[in-house]
Image (cartoon, coloured by chain):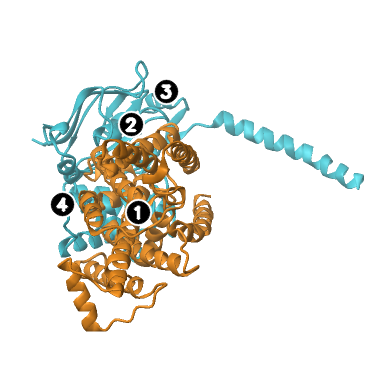
Amino acid sequence: MSEKTLEARELSFAFEPGRPVLERVSFALEAGELLGVIGPNGSGKSTLSRVLSRVLKPGAGQVLVQSRPAEKFSRKELARKIAVVPQQSVIEFQYRALEVVLMGRAPYLGRFQLEGKRDLEVARNALLMTDCLELAERSMDEISGGERQRVILARALAQEPEILLADEPTTHLDLHHQVKFLGLLSALRKEKRISALFTTHDLNLAGIFADRILILDRGKVAALGTPEEVLDPELVSRIYRVKLKVVPQIFGKRPWLVPQLDKEMTELKNYAAKSESQNQPQANSELTNK
Amino acid sequence: MTPLSRSRLFSILGLLFMLLVLAVLLALFFGNVQINLGFYELADQFLALVKSEQMSRDGMILFRVRLPRALLAVLVGGGLSLAGASFQALIRNPLADPYILGVSGGSAFAAIIGMIIASAFSFAPVPIFAFLGALASIFLVLAVARTRGKLPVITLLLAGVVVNAFFGALVMFLLSIASSSHLPSAIYWMMGQVSSKNYSTIGLVALYYAPGIAVLLGLARDFNLISLGEESAEQLGVNIERSKLLAFIAASLLTAVAVSVSGLIGFVGLMVPHIIRLTFGPDHRLLLPASFLCGGIFLALCDLLARLLIAPAELPVGVITAILGGPFFIWLLRKSRERMS
């Protein structure tokens, strides 16, 4: 039997009364599982990871961490279990990358305790895993957005968490590092049994890397299951209000959805043809004007 | 450069402490009156001070006038710098400073009320009045500046300026209507001045400082984590609301005590932490104690300048810090605007 590391039970949340952002969201993350959360803008993805990490207090329902209610943990205890990679981080003051990663060790240190040898080792290892050891001595405001995102991921890994929550972690990454990042999450779950929840707009990357996918639609769970079950073109098309079709058999059984843009493509072609035919005389008239 | 280790921390702080001693010695031996005392006479006069015996004129100048004044400058400069560094960490902005945020203004106003009450009832704990004034003004400034849950730099600076001007006017009003024989002069309040106080006052300042300093040093790592954003700090185990509240209270206490013994000295808390960040990096576990020591060095030297520049007359030390601090602030503002764009 697999154990549940993180469980959401009927979670509801609203910033203002009467306008729920999350409504009775329930799911369980198993040890070593990679769960992809997808859904249109405003469907509650970011709010979900904030409620799960207890930055926001749920209006109703419960978050269980290893079968224990999250509110029973102290902040520090919770930080040893759950690490969060935020969507965007603005870091004030010019810390070097290694200093930022070492901050991930804070949950393990006493108030006046400085980081020791082992903390440094963990931090360097985390930098190595996210492919940015060479950035260690660089100042955080000298490096690019994607590099910063990787350093932040290294900081989360330095927390040695059992659960990793990543809010659109691949948004600022180039293609290489998108694949690498999700590959890393995938490897971590096998090697260290770290379970991870990541939100994304990339259905297909989620489909390839995630063990299961949860689709949020206007704060409610619209579907939860393996990519094969969930990435149903009809369902996803309805939620995203874009017609999608499956391109079969690119990655084994994993579905690959692409927008069906037949109409748009025809329009685009017509437009191009039209403007071409218009451009010709226009260019001429410009010449004659001169 | 390796991350902060015990040896790095203590060697830097040790070095700064030696510089601080040096600055105090400079303040002791330079001044309007030439002092010519040999080592044995010095030791002799110092013993006389400790035993409260009769002292020579030179001994009096050194140990009853210049030393307490230098020590007070060290405490005031150190307290304002540590408060400045803490406000900067809390607000996540290098432009914060007790003076710019209006905290000093609020303290001064409340301190004067305390002094007026003290003169009527022959007792009132002035620093506690100043402390309440400081707390009221920081929370007022934050409430005014907060826009949709955020603290934009511009509104924060504007709110600070307005609160400062408002309390400045109230200070002038009180000074005009109160029989001012027992109140320090308007210059003292508006420009800030370090003067010779007796040692019991200095001891009292140190006593009021102690809890504030202890709390802020204990929050140093929380300040580091807050630099990543309040949410991230929370997710890294910081009890954010408690840490912030404690820090605001402690930094306000330091500001209030400094203001009640020296009036409004501006820009120290802005310049000193920034220079330390440029030299030693932003880690608050080093930045906070180093700011205290360097603030002490800085204000002791500024006060020496204030005594020497137009000797035998004196300038208020706040004139010196403001002349240095104004351009510094503008430079910092331009730099942080470049970073934002």
Q: Secondary structure at mark 2?
A: helix
Q: Residue at x 25, y 64 (%)?
A: B4
Give the chain letter at badge 1: B
- Marks 2 and 1, Cα distance to the nearest angstrom? 40 Å
Disc 1 target residue: B80
Quarter of the picture holding the N terminus of chain A? top left
Disc 2 target residue: A47
- Which numbered disc, 4 or 2, marks the residue closer to the eye? 4
Please determine whether, in this image, residue B310 is positioned above or below residue A235: below
Q: Residue furthest front?
A: B54
- Which numbered disc, 3 or 1, marks the residue closer to the eye? 1
Q: Secondary structure at mark 4?
A: helix
Tell me residue B131's x, y (percent). 30, 41
- Which numbered disc, 4 or 1, marks the residue closer to the eye? 1
Q: Are marks 4 and 1 on the same chain?
A: no
Q: Mark 2 Cα within 10 Å, few/some/many (few <14, many 20+)?
A: many
The residue lying toward the viewer, choosing from A66 and B48, is: B48
Q: Please name the color used to draw chain A.
A: cyan
- Which numbered disc, 2 or 3, marks the residue closer to the eye? 2
Q: Are marks 4 and 3 on the same chain?
A: yes
Residue type, numbered disc 3: Arg
Query: The chain drawn orange is chain what?
Result: B
Residue type, numbered disc 1: Leu
Quarter of the view holding residue B294: bottom left
- Residue A108 disc label: 4
Q: Mark 4 Cα within 10 Å, few/some/many (few <14, many 20+)?
A: some
Tell me residue A202's x, y (percent). 40, 39
B177 sits to left or right of B136: right
> Are the residues at dot 2 and dot 3 in contact (C-beta closer than 8 Å)?
no
- Residue A238 disc label: 3
- Marks 2 and 3, Cα distance to the nearest angstrom? 22 Å
